Image (cartoon, rainbow, N blue to C red):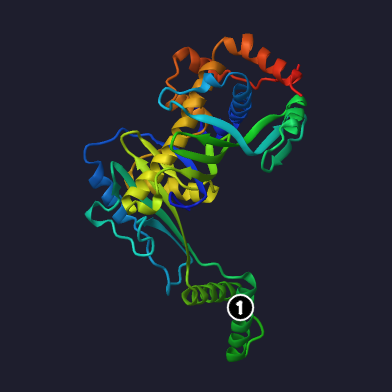
Amino acid sequence: MGVAASNIAITAYRVANEPEENIIDRVYEGLVRHTIIDIDGESLDKSIGWTSIDQPLDPDFSGSSFLVGSLFVFALRIDKKVISPKIIARQIQKETARKLRETGREFLGKGEKKALRDAVIADLNRRIPATPRTTDVVWNYEERLVFFFSNQKTANEEFETLFTKSFDMNLIRVFPYTFAMEMAGLTDGEIDRLHGLTPVSLVR
Amino acid sequence: MLDLSVAYHRYRFVGHEFLTWLWFVFENDPNQIALEAYPGFSVKIGNRVVLENTAHQAIETLIIKGEDVGLEEAMLSLKKGAMISEINLVLSTDRQQMQFTVKGEGLTISGMKLLENVEMEDELDREGFLLDRISTCEIVMNWLFGVFRIFLKIRLSENWDRRIVVDMRKWIAERP
């Protein structure tokens, strides 16, 4: 999902903080500190981090490669491993049978069952590759405006969290109320009226 | 400022009123949304309109889609008290034509396509291509924000109840 796609979705954000002089260094450090970590061959099932827009599978932010004109351009990558619950259940069944056979017991305790389940899931996660999904980010820091190229709730929430963690800046999602309060240049009288606004009926 | 998740739901109706007003303006006074920063822009309704009626206890949703979308049913729905929650628009400039859907409650864009582009994207290098695409997205978002700002000013003025609502009710009652 991105700016170069043939079908584009955009959610806009306002950066709550004023732009700073050393913003380029700060963005670079945030991108590097929270670069996506590859989880193929690992027991983890999910990884979230930043990646480059040009090389989403091999992120590299050196040489200010995230600067395009006067904009910061990078991408959020979410790697996820999805294992079918049926496969998990079958593996647990097989492992349980093996353990019972080896120990000569009839039942496993509650703690043993949980440990076995965790071990099965970790083993399956090590064996299957993650599916990466990238979503582009365009940040106009002079305008304090960020475009995130997805409208999906989960992706937007992950993006908001990682952005704040990486750059120590808060994002305000642009929707009618926040636009009115932050970007419309309303007078005090208009803001008072906004707070008392109720829906109108257009039917006589 | 209110809590944002509360505010999102509390002011959902403003986005719906905005899109409904937008259709009214397209048909009655398109100059009202002519932005100084974007001279020569023209806008028309594209291939999808979604309406929501919250006049009764349950929310009723009507989706109208297809090329040359007929707006008679949408108008019928407005006559029953519905408002537009999503609208597909075609925005034309002197060098580009973009089609996209605006969702009123979040001021988000989806399904945006470039129908025409005078610049040959193939001839641009990677950075040129990216900058061109970003510029197109900025044009669409800034146009949307500009028009929404005009609406807000009108919505929060005394003129809204005195004149605009009266004119919109008349338009809805009289339009076939």
Residue A106, image x and y in percent? 67, 85
The answer to whether residue B1 of the structure is visible from this angle is no
Q: Could you say whether the residue bearing mark 1 is in a helix, strand or loop?
A: helix
How many marks the image carries: the answer is 1
Near-viewer residue (A148 or A157)? A148
Residue at image point 52% right, 44% down: B115
Query: In which quadrant of the rendered image does the C terminus of chain B lie?
Result: top right
Q: Is residue A73 above or below residue A81?
A: above
Asked if residue A35 is positioned above or below residue A16 in the image, the reply reads below
Between B76 and B175, the one lying in front of the other is: B175
Q: Position of residue A15 (x, y in %)?
A: 38, 36
Circle 1 marks a residue in which chain? A
Say what amino acid the circle numbered 1 marks. Ile
Residue under label 1, please give it.
Answer: A92
From the viewer's perspective, tell me whether residue B132 is left or right of residue B25.
Answer: left
Residue A56: horizontal and vertical position, in percent?
Answer: 38, 60
Measuring from the top left, give residue B92's x and y in whole percent: 50, 35
Toward which corner of the image does residue A108 lie, by quadrant? Answer: bottom right
